[in-house]
Image: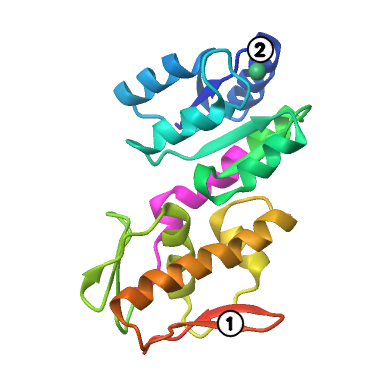
């Protein structure tokens, strides 16, 4: 059974989340302060963190940055304002999804489920990669031409998805699905940025090869040679 850590200073909001998540069979823990939550995350394993952006001690953004120094646990942000959303959608924060207040607790629970489904090893078990790629999903690692790629989790998931079906053209929407993030305009543009940085990392190892192909108006595919 998965355990979700809720970091939210408003008890009424936390309560509705606890209720909705427990109704879906999740264990929950609740923390009102980012500092307290980070200490907890260092000591214990959680399957997912729901993180409010507006917390009394430090912001959810700062908390997520600190969290990413030691953990890859999926993070879903709770945001209250549009200017916060822009930052959540930004690449550097390392969030997996976000919901805007006021939200439907049931929808949050459904999204939590979707993210965890994506993360579960059984679900992401791909076909063995061929060509220059070697994928080790348990160690969350992909070697390219015998060299380990240093990937963010989203880049890893993207490449893993493309590797799962070489030559198949994935639309941006399908790639978003594979990442388990909500499809909206900001995220579609983000797919392009992730692909761009992924290509740059591949090029560092093999400057001539261009394994990720762009199909104008359609999406991306992966060529194995
Ligand atoms: Ca708050």
What x and y, as percent, mark residue 16?
A: 69, 18
At which x and y percent is residue 73? 42, 38
Query: Which residue lies at the image location 39% right of the left edge and 42% below the top edge?
Result: 72
| Picture quadrant where residue 156 is located | bottom left
Answer with the quarter of the image where residue 191 lies. Answer: bottom right
- Alpha carbon of mark 2 to alpha carbon of mark 1: how far? 45 Å
Residue numbers of the magenta segment: 111-128
The kind of secondary structure element at disc 2 is loop
Residue 217, position as x, y percentages in the image: 72, 80
Label 2, residues with CA under 10 Å away: few <14, some 14-19, many ≥20: few
Residue 203 is covered by the magenta coloring: no
Residue placed under numbered mark 1 in the picture: 214
Residue 200 picture location, percent across and down: 42, 71
Q: Secondary structure at mark 1?
A: strand
Please tell me whether residue 117 belongs to the stretch shown in magenta: yes
Residue 10: which disc? 2
């Amino acid at each position: 059974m998965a355990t979700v850590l809720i970091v939210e200073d408003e008890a009424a909001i936390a309560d509705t989340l606890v209720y909705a998540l427990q109704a879906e069979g999740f264990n929950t823990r609740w923390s009102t302060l980012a500092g307290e939550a980070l200490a907890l995350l260092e000591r214990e394993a959680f399957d997912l963190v729901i993180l409010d952006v507006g917390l009394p001690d430090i912001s959810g953004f700062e908390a997520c940055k600190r969290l990413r120094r030691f953990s890859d646990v999926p993070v879903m942000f709770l945001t209250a304002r549009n200017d916060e959303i822009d930052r959540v959608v930004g690449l550097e924060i390392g969030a997996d999804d976000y919901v805007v207040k006021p939200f439907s607790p049931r929808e949050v629970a459904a999204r939590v489920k979707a993210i965890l489904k994506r993360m579960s090893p059984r679900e992401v078990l791909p076909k063995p990669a061929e060509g220059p790629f070697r994928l080790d999903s348990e160690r969350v690692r992909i070697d390219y031409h015998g060299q380990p790629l240093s990937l963010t989790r989203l880049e890893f998931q993207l490449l893993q998805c493309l590797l799962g079906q070489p030559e198949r053209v994935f639309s941006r929407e399908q790639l978003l699905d594979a990442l388990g993030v909500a499809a909206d305009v900001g995220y579609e543009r983000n797919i392009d940025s992730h692909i761009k940085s992924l290509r740059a990392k591949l090029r560092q190892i093999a400057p001539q090869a261009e394994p990720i192909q762009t199909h104008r108006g359609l999406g991306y595919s992966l060529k194995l040679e």
